[in-house]
Image (cartoon, rainbow, N blue to C red):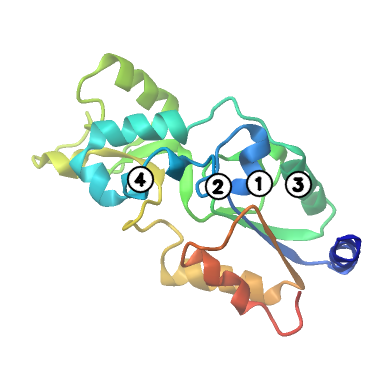
Amino acid sequence: MDSNLDTCTNLIGKAKNIVVLTGAGISTESGIKDFRSKTGIYQMAPEYILSLDYFYQHPAEFNQFAMEHLYHPDAIPNKGHEILAKWEKQGKVRHIITQNIDGLHQKAGSKNVIEFHGTIKTASCLHCGKIYPTEEMVSRMQTMEDFYICNYCKSKREKEHYIKPDVVLYGDAGEWFSVDGFNTIIQLIEQADCIVVLGTSLKVTPFSVFPQYRRRGAP
């Protein structure tokens, strides 16, 4: 174990352009559940709840699940987030590419963060694009029956103006799920002299394939 730790310490110490890939495991010390562990979210609810199909079929139930299990406004960054922010200030970490939607990297002070799976901090109308802060969505849930229907949208088809949290669901596509988005990330990976993977089992594609684009010899 000590030899592994020494090896990692030396690699990170020598690196000058680190790209960090993070997942839910880095936020568990901040009190946020991960997904696939024995105490994770998928032990409490089926995976399909976090799908676009489920959202369209059960918008109220989906939003209630999301607000209860994915939204953590009082969570604060832990030591892991703080160290990465420190390394960025020192010029060692170039970019963080995260699966997390909690915003804790930014709260810790990291600036160059790609939120590959979106953010829970806002929600948007699927038709007109009106953005709702999640605090407002919580208030709407408490005071309105059809809280998930946009008040500003002129569309006559109800499902077109549902308000969806700005997170990437199964069957969904986000800001970075595009040719330009992928090219940007792959270019960052190719330029890195070290890839650090923290808190993710790399089981969800396409995020899981990013390390394979590192340049030859980059640990």
Q: Residue at x 43, y 57 (%)?
A: 175
- Disc 4 marks which amino acid? Pro
Disc nearest the viewer among 4 and 3 = 4
Q: Image point 47% across, 67% down: which residue? A: 206
Instruction: Please name the amino acid that badge 2 sits on.
Output: Ser
Tag 4, which secondary structure? loop
Q: Position of residue 205 (x, y in %)?
A: 46, 66
Of the image marks 2 and 3, the number of the one nearer the N terminus: 2
Left or right, residue 61 beside residue 39: left
Circles 1, 4 touching at the beta carbon (< 8 Å): no
Q: Position of residue 53 (x, y in %)?
A: 24, 50
For disc 4, the marked residue is: 46
Identify which residue is drawn at 54% across, 27% down. Answer: 73
**Residue sticking out furthest to the front:** 38
Q: Which is in the foreground here, disc 1 or disc 4?
A: 4
Horizontally, residue 145 falls left or right of residue 10, namely left
Label 1 SS: helix
- Label 4 packing within 10 angstroms: few (<14), some (14-19), many (20+): few
Local packing at callout 3 (Cα closer than 10 Å; few below 14, some 14-19, many 20+) is many
92, 168: nearer the viewer? 168
Say whether disc 3 or disc 1 marks the residue closer to the N-terminus. Answer: 1
Lateral position of residue 127 relative to residue 207, left or right: left
- Residue 26's tag is 1
Q: Secondary structure at mark 2?
A: loop
* Residue at image mark 2: 37
